[in-house]
Amino acid sequence: MKVVLTEKPSVARDIARCLGVNNRRDGYLEGNGYRIVWAFGHLVELQEPDQYNRAWKRWSLESLPIIPERFALRARGDAAAQKQLQTVKSLLRSAGEIVCATDAGREGELIFRYILSWCGCEDKPFKRLWISSLTDEAIRQGFARLREGRAFEGLYRAAKCRSEADWIVGLNATRYYTLKFGQGSQLWTLGRVQTPVLALVVQRDREIADFKPKDFWELHTLYREVDFQHSGGRFEKKEEAEALRERIDGSDFRIISVKGKQEKVYPPPLYDLTDLQKDMSIRHGFTADQTLRLAQSLYEKKHITYPRTDSRYLSTDMKPQVRPLLQALQARFEPQIAALNLNQLALTGRLFNDAGVTDHHAIIPTATLPRSPLAGDEEKVYQAIAIRFIAGFYPPCLKQVTTVLGEAAEVPFKTTGTVIEAPGWQALYKDSSSQPAEQEQKILPAFEQGETGPHRPALKQGKTTPPKHYTEATLLGMMESAGKTCDDETLKEALKEKGLGTPATRAAIIEVLVKRDYIRRQKKLLLSTETGQRLIGLIADEHLKSAAMTGEWESRLKRIEQNEYDPRQFMEGIVRFTRAIVSSSRRGEAPADLGRCPLCGAPVIEGRKGYGCSDWRKGCKFVLWKEAFGAQISRRMAAELLWQGRTAEACGITIDGEHASAVLTLDPRGEIGVDAGLREPRP
């Protein structure tokens, strides 16, 4: 008897239909030589600390770091889930052949292997169903060419390392910072990926809060009713701009050169999950999690291919499938496909690239069209995926770009005009706000080199603007590139190897930060909360907040997947990192940021005799002296007072000649005091 394990009941039903399995049993389907049983996602997970050592149940600084010699598993979920796990265990143990049919990716592999191990079947051979869509044809083809399960050892090792690394870093960092700074009431939850993501948002919000706008001036001139701008850029001093304006005032303007060239703008690459999430955020305001759920639903309805992919290419062996797929899509997208010559499609390397396809190819529609209208939000995601696929076979947008250089009194000026000669693929996006198709063409008159004439110079004043708050789309982009801003598509692809999290996990990371009140949504913006800012300020170890380091870990996990990196070496690095977090903090290093002024919110800086507001020149009087009540206020204590309103530990003080131990406090007025309830006499 062959036992097939799926990730959820709906997939089990689809596979059963394709394999002719019709008999329903308690917790599984049976027939035609198969038993098809399902999980409910992660039915098995890593054990809790106290299951390794009872002493680890109690939170204490002395017990840190907690690192099990060997990780063990436990059943999770409610009674119904645990009953299903027992059914799975019984079937797997009696199976003549096992087929893994969980999602074809890192987490799907982990779900299966953890269940297999918990059931005591880790040494049993098994086959792997590896498909990129749930259409009946894909399922039948997948079962016709099942792959050896052990061929995916690298994928499992990477998934296991990810799971254990997150357990070690998250648990130890959370316990340490909660015990050290939580004051018995605040749980500080940290994570290997979520903390660097939070740090990105906090850093951006601080840059905006600390931004001081500056005036600038630009020199423009109007010649033949066309705006020319000074080629030298902006001026920080009005006097310099004014002097140049006076110099050219009254002189003729002369055209130095007129150069035109045709530019081709090719269709955008196909969607991977992150790009789809960014696009849906921009166009419809969907959260990353919302887009993932909608895409997953479309996948399970067989309308699109596997959504949790980081590839934007198709494999070359898919070329013969393109024409039949477009023909099938015509029933729903006839006007868009009618413009294509299906007998002469451009099947180029922009779309087909074997090196760019890892576990799964890009997200595209399948030939299984919706029989009835889709729900509104599902329809938006489906339309986006289908149109992006169709656009890939359209011709490029042709633009005529004319650059005109001129001068007045030897001061150089420049203007550029753009005319769209053939919209090409951009015709599919003329009503879309997500595509930068030129809605406003700038048509220039026929300038001739050497012509001269009068002009009207003028100064335009502006102010520098702060960086923009993160949106769901821009934060996903920064997570994808490990905090590096990049517009070049080739470099973007390279940076994906070192992103924060994976396409499958980024939405969940954002949702966790929102749920824990570290960030909040304000319409399309993602803003850090006061709680999130406090947490990042408390973390002294920059590595724990480092997007670059977390991205490097993700790169190593991908190398483990490809059997190019030793998982033991990865875990040794994680353990060393975790020990360093605890040991460096125990040495008494101060939090990374002193904190914010309680009076005006500006950053607090350290001076010779105290810690004062950085806006003292504007009149803010706040200062925290380095000695109070006879106690020396260290940098760390100052940070604790500013972030928490109290010191983490009692210190020796003297009041009216009486010596005592007490916790120091800082009230909202910026006045330091003593917590009388924690004051104890000292001999």
Image: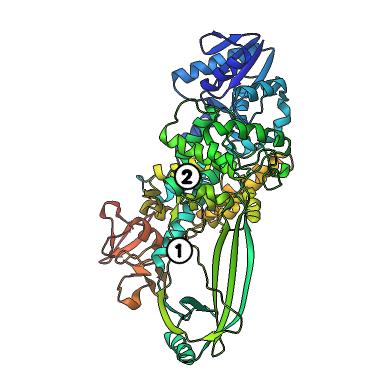
Q: Badge 1, how many Cα within 10 Å: few under 14, some, many 20+?
A: few
Quadrant where the C terminus is found in the figure: bottom left
The image quadrant that residue 449 belongs to is: bottom right
Query: What percent of the width, then of the height, locates residue 656?
Result: 25, 66
Three-letter amino acid code at disc 2? Met
Mark 1 element type = loop
Q: Closer to the camera, 490 or 85?
A: 490
Name the one closer to the observer, 447 or 226. Answer: 447
Q: Position of residue 185 (x, y in %)?
A: 34, 45
Three-letter amino acid code at disc 1? Pro
Q: Could you tell which of marks 2 and 1 lies nearer the N-terminus?
A: 2
Q: Can you give x and y, in whole percent of width and height, for residue 157 in the image?
A: 67, 35
- Badges 2 and 1: C-beta atoms under 8 Å apart? no
Compared to 66, does 12 lie above or below? Answer: above
Q: How many marks?
A: 2
Q: Position of residue 353 (x, y in %)?
A: 71, 44
Look at the picture and state if 28 lies above or below 546.
above
Specify few, some or many for label 2: CA neighbours under 10 Å numbering under 14, 14-19, or 20 or more.
Answer: many
The residue indicated by pointer 1 is 467
Q: Label for residue 280?
A: 2
Q: Is residue 42 left or right of residue 597?
A: right
Say which quadrant the N terminus sits in: top right
Residue situated in front as seen by the camera: 503 or 437: 437
Residue 539 in view (yes/no): no
Residue 40 vs 315, above or below: the answer is above
Cα distance in 3D space between marks 2 and 1: 22 Å
- 557 over 198 or under it: above or below: above
